[in-house]
Image (cartoon, helix red, strand yellow):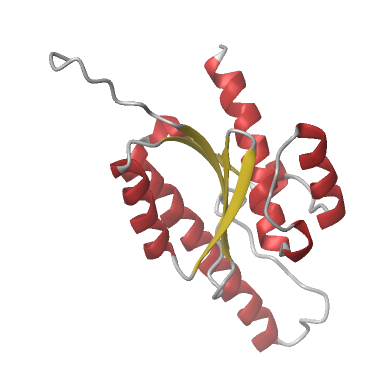
Amino acid sequence: MSSGRYIYLAMIYVGVDPAYRKGGFAVAVLEKKSMYFIKFDNVFFFYEWLKEKRAEQVSAFFCVENSDITNHTFFRLGARTPSALAKVSRNAGKNQAVSNLACLAIELVYGGDRLISLSPAQKGKKVSKAYFSELLKQEGISIASASRLTQDEVDAGMLCLKGKTLATLHKNK
């Protein structure tokens, strides 16, 4: 730059666990050795947050659970009637759509090279709050209040950690 000014791009890693239900769209942000969580009411608020981060010159790498990758109908035990099965299928479809919209929002704001989409199987099994807290402790990562974490936040946090590892592997190719 001719002005002699340099733009500092802070690197953050973001894990996104999208869901259609209110309060279920969870994001974990890892900045240096500190992790924090944000819950969005919908994908549009997430998109606005992405644009704010980009405007702040924040460099980010994203790891998103994209349930549309598996693209099959989920059945729950206890859903034995046709209407109950239809409801389960509709809810899965809503989450598949929100997953795709979250990925599209990231691509629009940051570009596709800053995004890794994982299927639920690739994301891995759910872990407990205790396990997640211990993992963060071993990694030297601090969070505000581990005891108040929801399962959605734990899932987003695990995606965040997985994304950091995958980004590092991708960068070192």
The image quarter containing residue 35 is top right
> Which quarter of the rendering shows the C terminus?
top right
The residue at the point 38 percent across, 55 percent down is 49
Q: Position of residue 72 (x, y in %)?
A: 63, 58
Evaluate whether residue 95 shows in this view: yes
Evaluate whether residue 67 shows in this view: no
Q: Position of residue 97 (x, y in %)?
A: 47, 62
Nearer to the camera, 2 or 135:
2
The image quarter containing residue 38 is bottom right
Horizontal relation, residue 3 to residue 109: left or right: left
Q: How many marks?
A: 0
Question: For the view shown, which residue lies furthest in the left direction?
Answer: 2
Horizontal relation, residue 105 to residue 3: left or right: right
The residue at the point 69 percent across, 53 percent down is 155
Question: For the view shown, which residue lies furthest in the front direction?
Answer: 4
Horizontal relation, residue 65 to residue 98: left or right: right
Nearer to the camera, 146 or 19:
146
Nearer to the camera, 112 or 81:
112
The image quarter containing residue 78 is bottom right
Nearer to the camera, 77 or 52:
52
> Which quarter of the rendering shows the N terminus?
top left
Q: Position of residue 4 (x, y in %)?
A: 19, 15
Looking at the image, residue 159 lies above or below residue 102: above
The residue at the point 37 percent across, 45 percent down is 53
Q: Position of residue 121 (x, y in %)?
A: 72, 46
